[in-house]
Image (cartoon, rainbow, N blue to C red):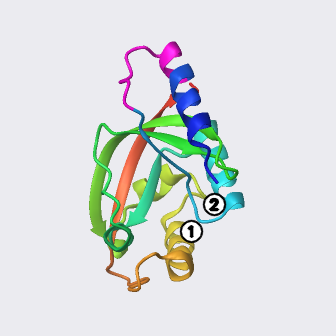
Amino acid sequence: MTDGAAITDFWHRVRAEHPSLPSELPEAWAFGATPDHADALLALVLSGAKTGTASSLWDYEASGDPVPSAGELSIILDGSGAPRAVIRTIDVRTVPFDQVTAEHAHAEGEGDRTLRYWRESHERYWRTHSESPRGFEPDMPVVCELFQVLHPR
């Protein structure tokens, strides 16, 4: 479970190093659906290999969570719920699953970084972990997000 005090303390430390950041606490979340997956994807973010992510628009609709927008900040958690990084969303586009580009697949930094790997792994992910009862469809709307790591640099 995520510790709100730890996240707030982390944000205060980050702001001390980066005073231009706003005082408002960003949303805190982890990549993936399991602690191990969160840790593996965080490692890719911290190494610089992962600068993009994709989410099901149907999952946002099912959960009631807002769709990300350019300029938003996020605190990224590890698999135990500890805050580890701050990212800024720089671009968001919603496209059908079968129209996600090879460039976006590469930006996600996973596997061999090919579109083929991206499609196979994301189809499997949404068939297994989708929050929406609609699950997966080849033309489902996918929110493709690009980000930059602000902390740690």
Cα separation between marks 2 and 1: 7 Å
Q: Can you tell which mark lies on residue 117?
A: 1
Magenta span of residues: 14-24
Question: Which residue: 61% across, 49% down?
Answer: 2
Question: Which residue: 43% across, 82% down?
Answer: 136
In this image, 42 relative to 26: left or right?
Answer: right
Task: Label 1, secondary structure: give it.
Answer: helix
Location of residue 106 in the rendering, given as x and y in whole percent from the top left corner: 49, 53
The amino acid on which the numbered mark 1 sits, given as a three-letter code, is Tyr
Which residue was labeled with disc 2?
111
Location of residue 64 in the rendering, given as x and y in whole percent from the top left corner: 33, 66
Task: Label 2, secondary structure: give it.
Answer: loop
Q: Quadrant of the N terminus?
A: bottom right
Q: Report the front residue among 44 and 22.
A: 22
Q: Are marks 2 and 1 in contact (CB under 8 Å)?
A: yes
Residue 34 visible (yes or no):
yes
* Residue 151: quadrant of the picture: top right
In this image, 100 relative to 6: left or right?
Answer: left
Q: Can you tell which mark lies on residue 151?
A: none
Q: Earlier in the sequence, mark 2 or mark 1?
A: 2
